[in-house]
Image (spheres, rainbow, N blue to C red):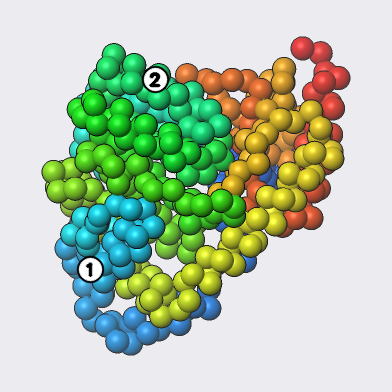
Amino acid sequence: MESDTSPLLARRMRDIKPSFIREILAAAGGNTISFAGGLPHPESFPAHEIRESADRAIERDGRSILQYTVTEWYRPLREWIAHRYGLLTGVNMSADDIIITNGSQQAFDLIGKAFVDPGDTILLESPTYLGALQAFEFFEPRYEELDLGQDGPNTEHLRTSLERHRPKFFYAIPAFQNPSGGSYSAKCRTEVARALSDHSQTILVEDDPYGELRFDGTRHRAIAADYEHSILLGSFSKIAAPGLRLGWIYAPRALREPLVIAKQAADLHSGHLTQAILHRFVTEHDFDAHIDAIIARYRTHRDAMVAALRETLPEARFSVPEGGMFLWVQLPGCDTHALFKFATMCGVTFVPWAAFSPHGGCADCMRLNYSNCDPETIRRGVALLAEAYEQYQKSPR
């Protein structure tokens, strides 16, 4: 019998819950169709190009890129990021404004370390990304939530929350939001920037891992372009490969310096070799063509899931996202936590609403990922979900 080690834990660890996605992956069998994780499709990974880039990077710069370097480095990659995403987002950024991170997940951790004291308020969208919630939880904040509509949050509610709670930061995913798939309209982005400018004690943390994955419509200017106290996050996990574990932070100097100090303490710097390989890939191959291929694939996946739901599960209510990786589905009157048990038995998984809210959220919504399954698997998975829903309806409650 193992002894009780809980007294050995730091106090902040005692209430930290494991990731719901981790629990789903552990529970799912080998034949389970998963709509749960936010995984890119393996066929989208540029394995051949990455291998070529690795060979070139090591052949030409092997000794230097195998050495320690400064925390913000690799500078050529930072210059490429500042140029590309400065143009795409409208944010006036330079290489000096960029910090390379071990994926967006490390960015959340650094932001918490640099800016959040126990009891500070963090303002969140409702629902919001569960990985960010888990990272922020270590810093013992209070949470306030803003309900999301079709075009973003209610900006009057935002103004009230900023005035009443004076949050340390507002964490937002304005493009193809995880989990809802929705996007802020241009008007909403302008109003959010204006509201924050009127209450400039709050930092904007704008997370943009999906902005490149637009199937329809026009890309909008980042909110960070119009609000001084902004941190903008980007990731290569969805547009290159998650195994690279590379993301980036844009921050103006006053906000950037504490983040650099926090990263120095965390890991000194992200992998120098990996950054050099990625830089070779994005500059020596047709990166835009690579993105276009991912978009074409995921658009097909999205359309397959939309068609399957409309045909097989007509009770489902959802909006069709213009990009990204997720569909947010409501089954009115259904407890999706209870449905999840039936779905697992039928061989399909998803994530219920409660995982995306610190306060539980609404019981009748769930997130479905369409990027990681091919269209035929999506159709089979939705059929299994419909079977699980039928069993749920017949069960005593």
Q: Which quadrant holds the C terminus?
A: top right
Give 264 or 188, whichever is nearer the viewer.
Answer: 188
Mark 2–mark 1 distance (CA, rounded to whole Å): 41 Å
Above or below 182: residue 300? below
Estimate the x, y position of residue 135 in percent, counting from the top left: 37, 36
Q: Quadrant of residue 310?
A: top right
Badge 1 density bin: few <14, some 14–19, many ≥20, Cα 10 Å: some
Task: Identify the disc placed on residue 210.
Answer: none
Disc 2 on helix, strand or loop? Answer: helix
Task: Name which residue type carries label 1.
Answer: Arg
Query: Dot 2, crowdedness within 10 Å: few (<14), some or many (≥20)?
Result: few
Residue of label 1: 75
> Which mark identifies residue 156?
2
Q: Where 87 falls versus 341 (above or below)?
A: below
- Residue type highlighted by circle 2: Glu
Could you tell me if residue 303 is visible in this image? yes
Report whether residue 30 is seen: no
Compare marks 2 and 1 and give the one earlier in the sequence.
1
Q: Residue at x 81, y 13 (%)?
A: 396
- Identify which residue is drawn at 68% across, 28% down: 330
Most distant residue in the front direction: 187
